[in-house]
Image (cartoon, helix red, strand yellow):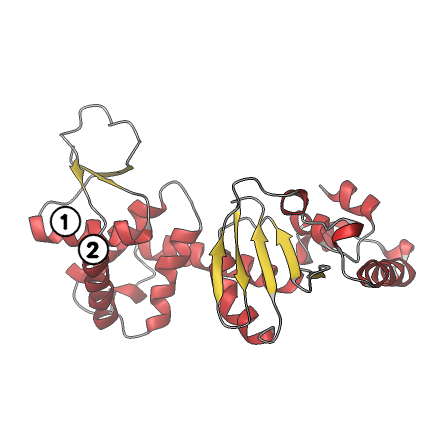
Amino acid sequence: MRVFRYDKTFEGLLTAVFYAYTRRQFPDVLIGENDPLPLFADEPFTVCTDTAHAERVWKGLERKVRQRELLSALTAAWLSELPDADTLIFRYIRKIFDYPGDFAYNLGDADVLRLNQIWRKVNRESSYVIQFLRFQKTADGIYFAALAPLYDVLPLTLPHLTDRFADQLWLLYDIKRGYGYFYDGKKPEEVRFADPPEALRTGKLSAEQMAEGEKDFQQLWQTYFQATAIRERLNPRLQRQNLPARFWPYLVEVPSSNRTASR
């Protein structure tokens, strides 16, 4: 059994593809740097991530695939964080390079079909994030939002957010994965915190952290939410279909009691 060990980054995976073709040896198993070696495996080949090699593989894919948007399926599969995502991506890339014609469009192939299914799920989750994130204004003028999406989709939301909120300072944070993006009015930068404050763990600012009027603004939304709700027509099942319950705790217009009940 041939094993490739790499750093579990997307660039590392593309570098593994480069070395597989260079060596004409293709892995049966891909493992992380600290993962145990499978039973009956050969001595693993350690892949050292190389940006130039990764870019060369990516450019090769761009030449092979007519519609560039299909390459988004690769990054979407990676951001899904599914256990077998890297193996699926590796097989898909091999088939694009090795098979003649437009293999990337062949939904009759199990790998292509699976990749497209994951792509749709990840894209749907990024759309949910864009629809359901709620910014709160802090005392220092920064708009803050935090949530815990099902997949690692924050990078997919950046083009929309930087366009929609180009004139504002904002921080979007992924509670589940412990990182976020801060936009300084020019470009978003990834940020991480060694000891995240309470707001980054709950997604909610304290009254002291809020800008003047923010608390009143949220109260107005909650009053509107309660006033427009028709109790006799409540349909929790339909609510969860249109607005997944995992986003409810972070909606400023939902009263605290409803957020707790939705978990």
Q: Nearer the viewer, residue 111 or 13?
A: 13
Discs 1, 2 touching: Cβ within 8 Å = yes
Q: Amino acid at mark 1?
A: Ala
Q: Residue at x 16, y 54 (%)?
A: 18
Q: Amino acid at mark 2?
A: Arg
Q: For the residue carrying disc 2, how many other residues have a C-alpha within 10 Å: few (<14), some (14-19), or many (20+)? A: some
Residue extending farthest front? 140
Q: Residue at x 30, y 56 (%)?
A: 109
Q: 179 above or below 98?
A: above
Q: Position of 159 compared to 1: left or right? A: right
Q: Position of residue 129 (x, y in %)?
A: 59, 59
Q: Secondary structure at mark 1?
A: helix
Q: Which quarter of the image is occupied by the N terminus?
A: top left
In the rendered image, which residue does mark 1 sit on? 20
Q: For the residue carrying disc 1, how many other residues have a C-alpha within 10 Å: few (<14), some (14-19), or many (20+)? A: some
Q: Position of residue 19 (x, y in %)?
A: 14, 50
Q: Which quarter of the image is occupied by the C terminus?
A: top right
Q: Position of residue 147 (x, y in %)?
A: 62, 51
Quarter assignment of residue 164: bottom right
Q: Position of 31 compared to 204: left or right? A: left
In the rendered image, which residue does mark 2 sit on? 94
Q: Which of the numbered marks, if any, corresponds to residue 140?
A: none
